[in-house]
Image: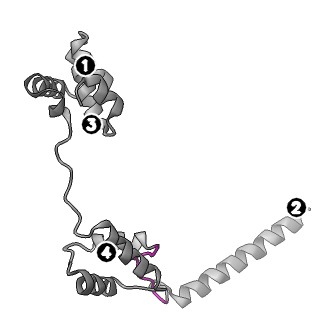
Amino acid sequence: MTSLDEMINTSQDVREVKRALSVKMLQYGITPGQIHSLLNVSVQYVSKWKTQYEANGVSSLLIAYKGKESYLNANQEYAIVQWIQQHKTLSIEQLLEHITKNYGITYKSKQSYYHLLDLGGMSFHRREKINPKHNPEKVLEKREEIKKNLWRMRQLSKKVR
């Protein structure tokens, strides 16, 4: 990018646009206090990006961090998602074993496995066959209470008629 206008019009990142707008507003004579109010940024923010722009140009306003490269390439990820979709149920352990065995990758965090399961259309939450909080005695008590309340309501509605 060669100009502030180009950056403002083409950037997909809001942070970059705010940086460019704050510098451009300064060039138009808007005070840092007004920019602070308009863009909801600090006065120090405005000063920092003005200094960066004057020293290094438009490229200094770009976000430098681009994230870490994925361990899996797009084709490998697609193959894993296809493999996941072939299964009715699948545990994290099974997915971990498959990825380690076939791709030589073991993630430190389970979040990566959850993400792959999500891409494959599966939930990563374990289901329990029965509700662990289920108490048959309380259920019966509640049923009796509902029956009594229903009976009372019927009696009241008969009296109202």
Mark toward the viewer: 1 or 2: 1
The amino acid beneath tag 4 is: Tyr
Q: Earlier in the sequence, mark 1 or mark 2?
A: 1
The amino acid beneath tag 3 is: Arg
The residue tagged with tag 2: helix, strand or loop?
helix
Q: Earlier in the sequence, mark 4 or mark 3?
A: 3
The residue where tag 4 is placed is 113
- Give the residue displayed 30% in from the left and 23% down from the top: 5
The residue tagged with tag 3: helix, strand or loop?
helix
The residue where tag 1 is placed is 24
Give coordinates of residue 73: x percent, y percent: 28, 67
- Give the residue displayed 29% in from the left and 31% down from the top: 17
The amino acid beneath tag 2 is: Val
Q: Residues within 10 Å of mark 4 (few under 14, many from 20)?
A: many
**Residue at the farthest left position:** 55
Q: Quadrant of residue 89?
A: bottom left
Estimate the spatial distance between the alpha carbons at disc 4 and disc 2, rounded to whole Å.
Answer: 62 Å
The residue where tag 3 is placed is 15
The label on residue 160 is: 2
Q: Is residue 58 magenta?
A: no
The residue tagged with tag 4: helix, strand or loop?
helix
